Structure formats: structure tokens, C-alpha cells
Amino acid sequence: MFDLSRFIDACQNALETPKPEQTICEIMSEAAAHPASIETALRPGGATAGECAQYHFLYQSSDLTILNVIMPGHLPSPPHNHLIWAVIGIYGGRENNVFYRREGDRVVEAGRRNLVAPEVMVLTPDTIHGISNPLAQRSYALHVYGGRLANPARSLWNPFTLQEELFKLSALLNYEREMIQGAAKSQNKN
């Protein structure tokens, strides 16, 4: 049975290991293997198709942030970075990742990885990625970050021009809305 307090304690203890992100990956893999237990403990509800993602902070300190992320169906999200390592555990649905690398003042696609529950992935501090939920139903994930996620040096890339700008959650959510509207318009044309 998933217990949020024990999960937080295990993640905090993992920070004392030589490779905390790898230790947390193992902790996350065990947790994500029991999605019903996580859903019962966290009672995720919320977002429906056409809405933006929901980010529920479960724990935050200077060296650790834990989020429950709910992505509505068919949600695209623009490229961004974290500047700290991250462990992403999908416990319901799917998350498609597009990875980018810098090229001049823009980013270009450098690879892809699609996660299906209960998969887990580790991101390095220099990772730039955009995510999407390709399914009609919501996807659910636990995200653990090796530090405070609210870092003013983070970047966001305009999904239409791929030019870099300072990360602001309001800008991320506005881009998500614009991307959803653009996808809806192109579906209506077909």
C-alpha cells in the first residue's frame, strides 16, 4: 500500500546515497507498480480533456520536491528544463517525451521516449523536454526533483518558434492552452 509519508521519508533518505536519483528510481518503480494504491492515497481527480495539467505539490524543501501531476487527455506541453535531476514515475496512462538540444538561440529535436504506466525515467539536470499525453483519458505521474523546482534560472521554449525564454508557470499554462486550441482547430478542419 502506498503511504505518502513513507514515500517522502524514503526519498529524503535516498538523498544521502551516492546516486540519489538512481535510488529514488528504484523507490519510484516499486510505488508505480501499484497504481491503485497511489490513486487511493492521493485521490487524484481533476483535469479533463481541453484543460491544462495540474501540478499538486506533495512535498518541497531546498533539496527535494515531490509532485503529483495530472495531465488531461491529448494535452501537449512545451519544451522546458528543470536544471536539477528528476525521476518521473507514470502510474496511470501514458506520457510521450520529446527531447531537445540547443542549437543557437533555439532548440531542435534530439530524441523521443514514450512512457506507459508503470514506467519510470530519470532526467539529468541538463535535459530539455516537452511532454504530451496522447490518450483521451488522463495520465497520472509522480515527479521527484533533486531540489526546489521553483528555480528562476529555468527556461521555457516557445512551442511555435522554439525560442528560449525565462520559465514562468503562467506562460507554460498559456502555451498549453494555445497548443490545445491549435490541435482542436486542425481536428475540426479534418
Image (spheres, rainbow, N blue to C red):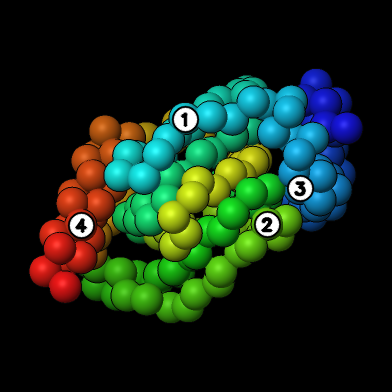
State which mark lies toward you, 4 or 2: 4
The answer to whether 140 appears left or right of 121 in the picture is left
Q: Which mark is residue 32?
A: 3
Q: Are marks 1 and 4 in contact (CB under 8 Å)?
A: no
Contact check, label 1 and label 3, Cβ < 8 Å: no
Kindly identify which residue carries mark 4: 184
Q: Report the Cα–Cα distance between label 1 and label 4.
A: 21 Å
Q: Residues within 10 Å of mark 4 (few under 14, many from 20)?
A: few
> Image quarter for residue 63?
top right
Whether residue 190 can be seen here: yes
User: Of marks 1 and 3, which one's residue comes earlier in the chain?
Assistant: 3
Q: Give the residue number, with chain letter if any, for mark 1.
A: 46
> Dot 1, how many residues are within 10 Å of its Cα: few (below 14), some (14-19), or many (20+)?
few
Residue at the image point whose x is 32% and y is 39% from the top: 51
Q: Which residue is at the front of the view, 87 or 141?
A: 141
Q: Earlier in the sequence, mark 4 or mark 2?
A: 2
Sequence-wise first label, 2 or 3: 3
**Element assignment for label 1:** loop
Q: Which mark is residue 89?
A: none
* Up/down of 54 relative to 30, above or below: above
Q: Please state which of residues 161 and 14 is positioned toward the viewer in this rendering.
A: 161
Q: Are marks 2 and 3 in contact (CB under 8 Å)?
A: yes
- The answer to which image quadrant residue 53 occupies is top left
Q: Earlier in the sequence, mark 3 or mark 4?
A: 3
